[in-house]
Amino acid sequence: MTDSLLNAKVLIVDDEILSRQIVAKTLNSIGIENISSVTNGLEALEVIKSQTHNIIICDLNMPEMDGIEFLRHLAITDYSGDIILISSQDKRMIESVGNLASAHSLNVLGTLRKPILAKNLKEMLSIKNSPNRKATTNAVDVITPVELKNGIENQELVNFYQPKINVATKKIIGVESLVRWKKNDGTVISPDKFIPVAEKFDLIDDLTKYIMKLAIKDCLGWNISGQDFSLSVNVSTLNLKALDFPSYVNSLIQEFNFETKNLVLEVTETQLMEDTLTPLEILTRLRLKGIKLSIDDFGTGYSSMEQLKSIPFTEMKIDRAFVNGASKNEAAHAILEASVSLAKSLEMSIVAEGVETKEDWNLIEKMSIDIVQGYYIAKPMPAHEFKEWMDCWNAK
Ligand code: C2E
Ligand code: CA
Ligand code: CA
């Protein structure tokens, strides 16, 4: 065990004495001595006001304030340590609560089912010090619409590109463009931070038009003439409110002489649309022109069955929540299987995103999924690197 783990301050939140004792003993056995415990969420919130902890080990079923409510309150304190969830609930229930906590931007190390085995707890604590672990910050930089507007106008937005691979042939069949904001001071801001701002403050049309043009230019720069190589661009549902959107896309295709069938628009519904008729009309018109349509993040949010029924999608992109680690997660596995069969019967091609490991790849291959995208193949990269990467991959 490393020093930082030995010096960890742990808070156990559990109403069962026996369970608290077992956890404390396990921690002792790996050299962690600084442990306090309380019996419910309310007490825990009191304690963390006056003492700092690095790890909270929390039960779900507790009187006064249960674990789920506790996590919600914890999310609005400035607690930045780790959390391990334990419960005698079934595995799926504990996993759901784990997802909920992560959605609150809490750092969940993992979830354990009672009775706690020392081996499992140790394994989980060892993740804490793994060098591969992503540093998470709770601090969200506030981006103002004026800043973003200037950023777009000053052409500070760039696209990164991530390859899509045919599972059977291992050939590169296309690329997805993923926008980044490269500020003049060198900081790079990820789309999750500024796309919502663009959507909220009416900047999303300008943003999408700009990055779509850039993507087409970059793609033509790779000189992949004569090949079936698709370019996927993300489109916000708010773009589908503007009736002139199809003509803009069309004008780009004409201007750059881009092959219509090689353009894919990935649509994620991030917010429920009140007017569903206009997006439907726009998407149908785009499809009529030969542009391909992909339903992004399938299985999450509003990307739903209802849309599959009414919109002529050509591709289903299964969200990485059901792909990464699916070989070990029964629910994810089942949803993946059902999505594949749905896509096949609707004659849509299927892309599994978030393939990170060999196990993910093997499962996808076994399920006869056509296309894969994920860190296992490559991370998104700048346009010039993508060309080099492609040459390298093709040479293999
Ligand atoms: P998305 O469209 O679902 O894109 C996939 C995201 O997953 C990308 O994050 C990509 O870098 C990441 N990813 C790819 N493979 C893996 C993997 O194996 N493991 C993990 N953990 N992640 C992987 P990114 O680039 O940060 O984009 C986040 C989201 O921002 C996108 O999700 C998309 O919804 C939105 N976005 C990105 N570019 C644009 C854009 O140009 N326009 C719009 N409207 N939205 C965009
Ligand atoms: Ca996408
Ligand atoms: Ca996704």
Image: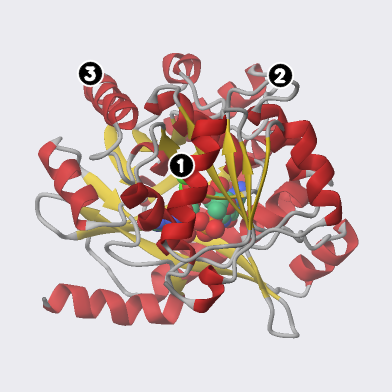
Circles 1, 3 touching at the beta carbon (< 8 Å): no
What residue sits 74% from the left and 83% below the top? 184
Mark 1 residue element = helix
Tag shown at residue 345: 3
Give x and y (percent) for residue 132.
42, 70
Q: Which residue is at a point 83% across and 69% down the rendered structure image?
A: 150
Residue 311 location, x and y as percent? 47, 21
Which amino acid type corresponds to the residue marked 2 in the rendered image? Asp
- Looking at marks 3 and 2 on the same chain, the residue that comes earlier in the sequence is marked by 2
Q: Is residue 111 left or right of residue 225?
A: right
Q: Is residue 60 above or below residue 201?
A: above
Query: Between disc 1 and disc 2, whose residue precedes?
Result: 1
**Disc number at residue 22?**
1
Instruction: Say which of marks 1 and 3 sits in front.
Output: 1
Q: Answer whether labels 3 and 2 touch (C-beta < 8 Å).
A: no
The answer for how far apart the CA atoms under marks 1 and 2 are is 55 Å
Disc 1 vs disc 2: Cβ atoms closer than 8 Å? Answer: no
Please rate how many residues cluster around mark 1, counting C-alpha atoms within 10 Å: few if below 14, some from 14 to 19, many from 20: some
Query: In which quarter of the view is residue 45 placed?
Result: top right
Q: Is residue 188 visible?
A: yes
> Please, what is the three-letter code of the amino acid marked with disc 3?
Ser
In the displayed structure, 393 sits above or below 309; it is below
Q: Alpha-carbon distance for marks 3 and 2?
A: 29 Å
In the picture of the structure, the residue carrying the numbered disc 2 is 275
